[in-house]
Amino acid sequence: MISLVATDLDGTLLGSDGTIPPANVAALREAHAAGVAIVVATGRPTRWLACLEPIADLHPHVIASNGAVLYDLAADRVLAAAAFDQASVAELSASVKGALPHVRFGLERGDLFGTEPDSPSDHAFFPGVLQLPLAELISHISPVVKLLAYSRDLDCDALAGQIARVVADRAVVTTSLVHDHFGMAELSVPGVTKAQALAALCADLGVAASDVVAFGDMPNDADMLGWAGHGYVMGGGHPSLLDRFPRAGSADAGGVGSVLRRLLADA
């Protein structure tokens, strides 16, 4: 019995061109017609959700910014958010810079993002992104639903590991990509993960974990895949997930849709 499908976006529901493959759109429509609730659980901020237009009429529940934001796509409205205040951002960034002076930060509000001017982040080239010294970023962007740390010296896994040791229980630290040019780690409010947000949403909807199928590809999906009764990692997923969960094939080939159709047929 599948009552709800939860899927990550990049590298999972979306193909390499940033759109939802037709096979995935068709499978989600089939699931919706069968009464299955659709949840998108992404590290993306709310301003980066235009890719959901092909399934917007299915009224998916949206968990954004790694679980920090519950968003109403149709109404373009944030329903709930767990965010750092200015003092917390200042404290966390100072602690990390004290241990890793080369790290640069990005601050995400959901509708607004900014980076330090010398950040290696390619997000800095997007329209509307602020580039300011850290102290000015902290005063301009608040509250912060996700604090991003960048390094030219460490890869994503190494950076996330070192930052996690520095911040301890003051933040949840994860990563959502593998990048050749820089490392990126993502910090959320303590206790905030995709899994936590999905569990809370399912409780509100009266859906048991055993009736949930979830798809993802990166460490920020790990807890969600473990919580769901049926967790699948994409074939191109992070090495830390590939031995833990069954594989769903590739994102470009519509791996989400293939598994979903099989589960619906078996129900």
Image (cartoon, rainbow, N blue to C red):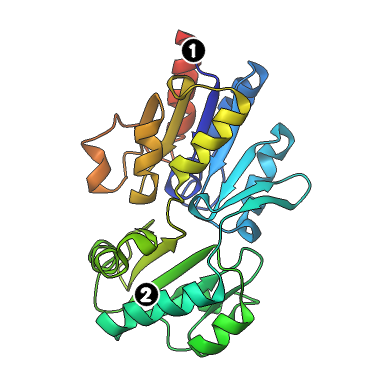
Relative horizontal placement of residue 53, taking residue 207 as reference (left or right): right
* Front-lying residue, 105 or 82: 82
Q: Residue at x 42, y 78 (%)?
A: 91
Q: Is label 2 in a helix, a strand or a loop?
A: strand
Q: Sort mark 1 into few (<14), some (14-19) or many (20+) by Cα contacts within 10 Å.
A: few
Can residue 25 be seen here?
Answer: no
The amino acid pointed to by label 2 is Tyr
| Mark 1 lies on residue | 1
Q: Earlier in the sequence, mark 2 or mark 1?
A: 1
Can residue 156 be seen here?
Answer: yes
| Mark 2 lies on residue | 150
Relative horizontal placement of residue 211, taking residue 33 as reference (left or right): left
Residue 63 vertical placement versus 263 (above, below): below
Q: In the image, residue 119 lies at what x, y percent?
A: 42, 82
Q: In the image, residue 204 lies at what x, y percent?
A: 61, 30
Q: Is label 1 in a helix, a strand or a loop?
A: loop
* Front-lying residue, 241 or 209: 209
Q: In the image, residue 124 lies at what x, y percent?
A: 52, 78
Q: Sort mark 2 into few (<14), some (14-19) or many (20+) by Cα contacts within 10 Å.
A: many
Spot the residue most to the right. Answer: 75
Q: In which quarter of the image is residue 142?
A: bottom right
Q: Residue at x 53, y 66 (%)?
A: 84
Residue 73 vertical placement versus 1 (above, below): below
Q: In the image, residue 240 lies at what x, y percent?
A: 23, 46
Residue 42 vertical placement versus 189 (above, below): above
Relative horizontal placement of residue 52, taking residue 172 as reference (left or right): right
The amino acid pointed to by label 1 is Met
